[in-house]
């Protein structure tokens, strides 16, 4: 029998990738807890509806009593916490949901996990893990072209999103130090890949391009991000949850630093090759759709991860290069139109009403 994973935020981009990885490649059992906000999409897991190794619970992680009840019933070996408000622009327009889910929700989940953990026998207490999934954005802006974020880099978050994620990281560390809860934390760079909600840079650009809409690039597009293919992240998370050392933080990154403009131009080049027949007749290249728009306030210039610790200790390395991952991603969006058309039309949210059918 496999380990029992209780995964929060499993209907989101990365959570669903973790669940697909666990169900397709391991014998582990999964309970997926998700509130199904606008970012939650059960279509991403439709292939597993009815699996006896998977069940879904539409719950808010802020509901501590409900989370406690579920933990007692499901008896997880691992709580992997990905539920969050995750979009920086939305955090600037309205930080309140970010404070609630990312800080208060993490606190509630920690308390539910602590109460559950205390009911376990000594050997299960030792092997239990609370895995908190976080971002490299907690480290703030990286100055200079050489420096990398390590696990020792001081926190200096810039946006409401990254400030709430930094707060949640501190809470998780405190619950280990104060109460002895066995935690591990991961901080990862920007993810991309299949099933990514179209508000995020890469899917937004692909879908705008094939609809002949402008491709809005913030500022001069010079901001640097370190891109990681989501399936590489999912594998890394499972390695850390099952083999990482208690109390440790692991940075996860793809060694793929790219300027935003370079990413958008790469997408256009791929689309010129793979979707030439959909390009408006007036254009010679999708690149002509690029438009520069006013920069995001407080926009960090550069993020880049030193992932040598997870490589050294757990042997994890990414399998995809940026070139291979970005090609797979463009191909996925060109093939899987029903998935994103249901997001753009809003129909994907119908699953909220019939969530039980996906259990
Ligand atoms: P996402 O926005 O795609 O998914 C978040 C999921 O959490 C959604 O399914 C949503 O319905 C759910 N959720 C939100 N509030 C909830 C609540 N109160 N209770 C229960 N469920 C709730 O996010 P993602 O990109 O998959 O990110 C997952 C985690 O990884 C986040 O914690 C994020 O901070 C972190 N992270 C993301 C990236 C990235 O590039 N996307 C990089 C590093 C770290």
Image (cartoon, helix red, strand yellow):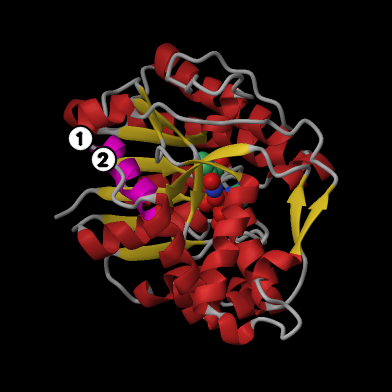
Check contact, mark 1 vs mark 2: CB within 8 A: yes
Q: Residue furthest front?
A: 284
Q: Residue at x 45, y 34 (%)?
A: 132
Residue 239 - label: 2
| Residue at the image position 45 percent from the left and 29 percent from the top | 305
Percent of width and height locating residue 242:
24, 38
Question: In the rendered image of this protein, does residue 6 appear above or below residue 272?
Answer: above
User: Which quadrant holds residue 267?
Assistant: bottom right
Numbered circle sitting on residue 9: none
Q: Position of residue 280 (x, y in %)?
A: 71, 83
Question: Which is more N-terminal, label 2 or label 1?
Answer: 2
Q: CA distance from mark 1 to mark 2?
A: 9 Å
Q: Tell me the crowding category of disc 1: few under 14, some 14 to 19, or many 20 or more residues within 10 angstroms, Cα based.
A: few
Q: What residue is disc 1 on?
A: 315
Query: What residue appears at the point 47 percent right and 22 percent down from the top-left corner?
Result: 148
Say above or below: 134 vs 247.
Answer: below
**Residue range corresponding to the magenta coloring:** 231-242
Element type at mark 2: helix
Residue 325 at least partly seen: yes
Most distant residue in the left direction? 1
Question: Where's residue 352, x and y in %?
Answer: 61, 71
In the rendered image, is residue 33 in sight?
no
Hey, which quadrant is residue 178 in on the image? top left
Residue 238 within the segment the image draws in magenta: yes
Q: Nearer the viewer, residue 298 or 357?
A: 298
Residue sitting at 72 percent across and 86 percent down?
281
Position of residue 322 in the picture relative to residue 190 (left or right): left
**Image coords of residue 119 (percent x, y):** 32, 32
Tell me: 233 left or right of 93: left
């Amino acid at each position: 029998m496999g380990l029992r994973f209780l995964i929060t935020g499993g209907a989101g981009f990365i959570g669903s990738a973790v669940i697909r990885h666990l169900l397709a490649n391991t014998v582990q059992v999964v309970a997926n807890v998700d509130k199904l906000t606008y970012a939650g999409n059960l279509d991403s897991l439709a292939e597993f509806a009815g699996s006896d190794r998977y069940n879904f619970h539409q719950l808010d992680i802020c509901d501590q009593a409900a989370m406690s009840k579920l933990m007692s019933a499901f008896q997880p070996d691992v709580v992997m916490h990905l539920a969050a408000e995750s979009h920086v622009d939305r955090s600037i327009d309205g930080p309140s949901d970010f404070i609630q889910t990312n800080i208060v929700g993490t606190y509630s989940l920690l308390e539910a996990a602590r109460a559950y953990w205390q009911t376990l026998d000594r050997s299960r207490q030792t092997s239990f893990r609370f895995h908190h999934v976080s971002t490299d954005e907690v480290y703030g802006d990286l100055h200079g072209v050489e420096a990398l974020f390590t696990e020792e880099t001081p926190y200096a978050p810039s946006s409401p999103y990254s400030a709430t994620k930094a707060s949640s990281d501190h809470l998780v560390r405190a619950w280990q130090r104060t109460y002895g809860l066995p935690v591990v934390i991961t901080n990862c760079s920007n993810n991309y890949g299949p099933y990514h909600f179209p508000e995020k840079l890469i899917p937004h650009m692909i879908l705008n391009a094939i609809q002949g809409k402008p491709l809005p690039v913030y500022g001069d597009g010079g901001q640097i991000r370190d891109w990681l293919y989501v399936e590489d992240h999912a594998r890394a998370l499972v390695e850390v949850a099952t083999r990482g050392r208690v109390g440790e933080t692991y940075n996860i990154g793809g060694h793929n630093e790219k300027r935003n403009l370079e990413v958008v131009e790469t997408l256009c080049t791929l689309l010129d090759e793979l979707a030439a027949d959909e390009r408006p007749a007036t254009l010679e290249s999708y690149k002509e759709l690029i438009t520069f728009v006013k920069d995001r306030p407080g926009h960090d210039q550069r993020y880049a991860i030193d992932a040598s610790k997870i490589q050294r200790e757990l042997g994890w390395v990414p399998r995809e290069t940026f070139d291979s991952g970005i090609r797979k991603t463009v191909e996925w969006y060109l093939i899987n139109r029903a998935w994103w058309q249901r997001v753009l039309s809003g129909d994907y949210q119908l699953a909220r009403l019939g969530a039980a059918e996906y259990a």
